[in-house]
């Protein structure tokens, strides 16, 4: 049971960080197609985060949130990168890096967790697949 809760909290934090990262750069996306892709990715993160929240709530747990320092670091990094090069390519690069971190953390957490409930394993795998899709979407903007 604790493995399930830990994994759900990790999924929740990863998707929240993805949402936050998108929010940090989306207003710089002057390319309509890039803007749409970011909005679509944000919707996917919302769905996965909501699913994790529902599963946590069903277990009587409220989800963990990303810390203020991580959010502040994301904001500062986005602001600096956008001051230097506010291009679609730079935004895509930043999103690819973020999704790569998300994949790495999620796979490590899956391996570390050991036995997971089927629905939680499915959600964790869905997050990895979503991050991989996000990377593929961003490649055309590099």
Image: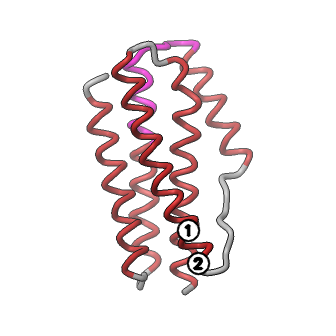
> What distance separates the C-alpha of mark 2 from that of mark 1?
6 Å
Considering depth in this image, is 68 or 63 the residue closer to the camera? 63
Q: Is residue 42 found left or right of 57 in the rendered image?
A: left
Residue at 46 percent across and 53 percent down: it is 47
In what element is the residue under mark 1?
A: helix
Indicate yes or no whether the magenta region holds residue 90: yes
Q: With respect to residue 112, does 96 lie above or below?
A: above
Q: Position of residue 32 (x, y in %)?
A: 38, 17
Q: Position of residue 2 (x, y in %)?
A: 58, 83
Indicate yes or no whether the magenta region holds residue 62: no
Residue at 37 percent across and 80 percent down: it is 118
**Residues at discs 2 and 1 in contact (Cβ within 8 Å):** yes
Q: How is the image coloured?
A: secondary structure
Q: Position of residue 38 (x, y in %)?
A: 42, 32
Which residue, given by chain and number where applicable, does mark 1 sit on? 54
Label number found at residue 58: 2
Magenta stretch, main secondary structure, is helix
In what element is the residue under mark 2?
A: helix
Considering depth in this image, is 57 or 140 the residue closer to the camera? 57
Q: With respect to residue 13, does 29 lie above or below?
A: above
Circle 2 residues within 10 Å: few <14, some 14–19, many ≥20: few
* Image quadrant in which you'd find residue 88: top left
Circle 1 residues within 10 Å: few <14, some 14–19, many ≥20: some
Q: With respect to residue 68, does 80 lie above or below?
A: above
Q: Which residues are magenta?
A: 83-98
Residue at 67 percent across and 56 percent down: it is 65
């Amino acid at each position: 049971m604790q493995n399930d809760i830990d994994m759900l909290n990790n999924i929740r934090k990863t998707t929240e960080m993805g949402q936050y990262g998108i929010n940090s750069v989306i207003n710089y996306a002057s390319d309509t197609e890039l803007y749409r892709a970011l909005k679509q990715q944000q919707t996917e993160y919302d769905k996965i985060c909501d699913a994790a929240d529902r599963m946590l709530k069903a277990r009587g747990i409220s989800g963990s949130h990303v810390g203020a320092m991580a959010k502040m670091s994301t904001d500062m990094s986005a602001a600096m990168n956008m001051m230097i090069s506010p291009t679609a390519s730079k935004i895509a690069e930043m999103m690819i890096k973020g999704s790569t971190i998300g994949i790495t953390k999620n796979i490590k957490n899956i391996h570390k967790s050991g036995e997971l409930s089927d629905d939680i394993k499915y959600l964790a795998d869905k997050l990895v697949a979503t991050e991989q899709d996000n990377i593929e979407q961003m490649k055309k903007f590099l």
